[in-house]
Amino acid sequence: MKKRDIKILLVDDEADILEIVGYNLSSEGYQVTTAKNGIEAIEKAKKHKPHLIILDVMMPEMDGIEACEKLREIPDLSNTVITFLTARGEDYSQVAGFDAGADDYITKPIKPKVLVSKVKALLRRLKESENPSDTIIKIGELIINREEYKITNKGEEIILPRKEFELLSLLATKPGKVFKREEILDKVWGNEVVVGGRTIDVHIRKLREKIGDKSFKTVKGVGYKFVD
Amino acid sequence: MKKRDIKILLVDDEADILEIVGYNLSSEGYQVTTAKNGIEAIEKAKKHKPHLIILDVMMPEMDGIEACEKLREIPDLSNTVITFLTARGEDYSQVAGFDAGADDYITKPIKPKVLVSKVKALLRRLKESENPSDTIIKIGELIINREEYKITNKGEEIILPRKEFELLSLLATKPGKVFKREEILDKVWGNEVVVGGRTIDVHIRKLREKIGDKSFKTVKGVGYKFVD
DNA sequence: AAAGTTTTTTCATAATATATTAATTGTAGT
DNA sequence: ACTACAATTAATATATTATGAAAAAACTTT
C-alpha cells in the first residue's frame, strides 16, 4: 500500500494538538482526518475506515477508552491499529487502554519526530500482515503455508514432518510437472546426501495417506507429479 | 530513558583524562566505563553496549580511528553515538574520523563544562531517534511491553530475564510463524555469539513453565512457534 | 572485595519423532 | 507372462528435542 493511501484518524479535544500533529502526519504524506471527541470519532471511523486511529484518553463527551471499546466493535475496523495519547505516568489509563483494545500508546507531551517514527513503526506492522504472497502456495483445496510449516487440506489442518513437507512443497510448486527422482533428491535431500532408492517412495506414500491418493501420480521410470 | 540508565564509554590512554572527564560525566549522573586503548574499548563496548563512546584519536595498541571502524561493525552498537577526542587543529584526523563513522568530535584541551554540554546535546539526538518501534505486542491474554520490559499474562504481571524476554518478544511478533533456530540465534543472541545447540531449548522450556506449555509449539527439524 | 543471587549456558541422558532400509508384494507396460 | 520398477510394511537407524542438574557467568548486596 502506498503511503498516500494510508488513512489516519486523529482524535483530540485540543485544537492545537489536532493542528500540530495533523500537520506533521500530513506532511509525511498520510491522509489525515480529525475528530474532537469520541462520538465524532466513531462517526468518522465508520465513514473513512482509517488504518490508524490516534486517540486522546482524556476527552469530553466520550473518553478515549470508551471510544476505543466502541471502535473495536466495528467489524470494518478489525485491522485498524489504535494508539492512545496519554499524559506521562498515567499508569491506570495505560492498562485500561489495553483492555479496551489499544495497540500502543504515545505519551504527552508529543514530540513530532517521535510521533512520526512511532506511526511509521505501527504502520509497518500493518503492512507486514498484508502480503502473505510467496510464503503461501494454494492449489485447489490445498494450502501450503511455508512460514508456519502448515498444510490445510479442505479446511483441515495437517502437520507434516520436515521431509514430507518439503517434498510436497516441491511438487506443489508446479502441479502437473513430473519431477524426476534425481531432481527430487537434489532439491529435498541435497545432492551430497546419498539415500537408498526406495526412500522417496516411502515419503510419497505418507503424503498419499495424508493428503489423498489421487493427488500424486507416479510416472514409471521417471518420477512423480502432483495433480490438481 | 532516564539519565542514570545512559551508559558512556570513555577511551583514552592518559589516566588523567579518564579521571577528570569520567568524574565530570559521573557527577552528571551518567554511567561511565573507561578503557585505555582500542582493544579494551571494543571488549567493553561489546559488553556494556554504551549509548555514547568518547574515543581519543591518538592511542597506542589501536588508534581511535581503527577502533571506531571496528566498533561500527558491531550490530548492537548501531544506535550508539561515537565522538572523537582530538587535539586542536589536527584536521586530518577529523576528516578520517568521520569516514570511520564518528558522529562528532571534541577538541583538546578539554573544558569540562563544554564537554558535558556537548554530551548532553549528543544524547538528546539519541533520545529522539530512540527506537520506538513495536512497544506493545498483544496476543490474546498476553501483553508484552517492550519499553518497560514487562509482560502481563491474564492480568498477571510476569518478570522475565532478558534472554527469555527477548525470545518471547521475537516469537510473539508473528504468532504462528515458525522461527528457525538459526533465525532465533541471529535475532536474540546475535550471530557472532556462539552458544551451544541446546541453549534455545532451555529458554523455551523456561517460557513454557512461565507462560504456558501450549503457547509454544516445536516444529521438529525447523524451530519453534508461538501460538495463540 | 566477598558473599549471595539470579541468569545463562552446558552437558549428559532420556524421550520422541522422523527418516531410512530392507524384504516382500504388487503392477504397468512391453 | 515376464520384467523392471513401484508400493507396502515393518523393523531399524538417525536426528532432534526435552529434561534435570549443575557449572559458569553476570549481577546485587553487603
Image (spheres, coloured by chain):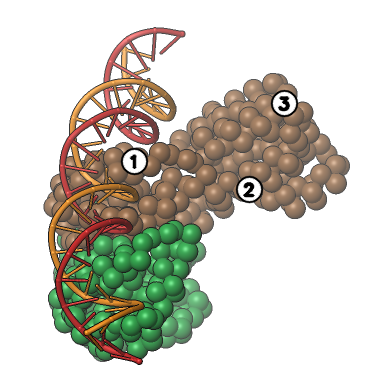
Chain colours: A green, B brown, C red, D orange
Quadrant of the snapshot with the N terminus of chain A: bottom left
Instruction: Identify residue for label 2.
Output: B72
Who is closer to the viewer here, A202 or B123? A202
- Marks 3/1 in contact by CB < 8 Å: the verdict is no
Residue under disc 3 on the same chain as residue under disc 1: yes
Q: Quadrant of residue A181?
A: bottom left
Amino acid type indicated by mark 3: Asp
Q: CA distance from mark 3 to mark 2?
A: 21 Å
Q: Is residue A218 left or right of residue A1?
A: left
Q: Is residue A190 above or below residue B49?
A: below
Looking at the image, is mark 3 or mark 1 earlier in the sequence?
Answer: 3
Q: Earlier in the sequence, mark 3 or mark 2?
A: 3
Helix, strand or loop under label 3: loop
Residue shown at 73% from the left, 24% from the top: B14
The amino acid marked with disc number 1 is Arg
Name the residue carrying label 1: B198
Q: How many marks?
A: 3
Q: Which residue is mark 3?
A: B13
Q: Position of residue A131 (x, y in %)?
A: 37, 78
Seen at 23% across and 43% down, the residue is B205
Residue closer to the observer: B143 or A119: B143
Mark 1, Cα crowd under 10 Å, few <14 / some 14-19 / many 20+, is: few
